[in-house]
Amino acid sequence: MLQRNRHGHPSREGATLDHVRMHEVITHIAFGGRRRDVYTRITALSGARPGDRVLDIGCGGGYLARLLSAAVGPGTAANCSFVVGAAQDLPWPDRSFDVVASTLAAHHIPEAARQDALGEMYRVLRPGGALLVADFRPSGWRHALHSRVTASRHGSAVPLEDLAAAAGFRIEAHGDLPLLGYVRAIRPGAS
């Protein structure tokens, strides 16, 4: 019998990082000292502003979550909470967030579940809300290093723009950052 998640979709296992400290070290090394600059740019691209409710999917050790938290209000540690789960089966109600961000997580989502994950991001984002998703560009020694060290089975670049458009998002911008490609998209509709 096929198991289904709470939305009636076929259930697919999600991946979580079991070795967060090692992942943080690898990420720091991969960015060659530019991690803070890149993640500060991602925070700005997300459009997160004071008072927004923000969801960081695949937050790892919380590096981006802390930057996003500072962008939306004072008391960084006080306004964050963390939940372990799968991107393709988010536990929040529809239209719960103003901004959804996801960095270096898409390649960890099983390929067969990626479209469901973007659909869930769409579902939990309010109309007019912004999605900022970033992941490895198609090639590069850092991606190869990350894949080998984490034993990733998701070796190819993730087609972020195609996945976001297929989920119903309106693509607003896309581009490259050191090591990463990104897509910024909006959930259509009035607030």
Image: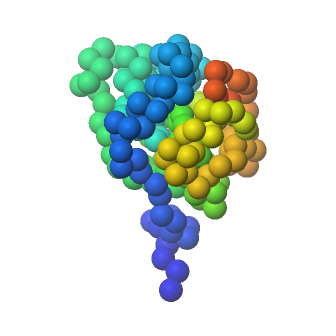
Residue pictured at 54% horizontal, 19% vertical: 32
Residue pictured at 64% horizontal, 29% vertical: 180
Give how far across and how far down residue 11 sits, in percent.
Answer: 51, 68
Kindly indicate the quadrant of the structure image that contains residue 86. bottom left
Residue pictured at 29% horizontal, 36% vertical: 81
Q: Is residue 93 above or below residue 29?
A: below
Residue pictured at 53% horizontal, 15% vertical: 34
31 or 3, which lies in front? 31
Give how far across and how far down residue 9 sits, in percent.
Answer: 56, 67
56 left or right, relative to 127: left
Kindly indicate the quadrant of the structure image that contains residue 177. top right
Q: Is residue 116 above or below residue 102?
A: below
Kindly indicate the quadrant of the structure image that contains residue 145. top right
Quadrant of the snapshot with the C terminus: top right
Q: How many marks?
A: 0
Residue 116 in view here: no
Give how far across and how far down residue 133 sits, in percent.
Answer: 60, 34
Give how far across and how far down residue 18 sits, in percent.
Answer: 36, 49
82 left or right, relative to 38: left
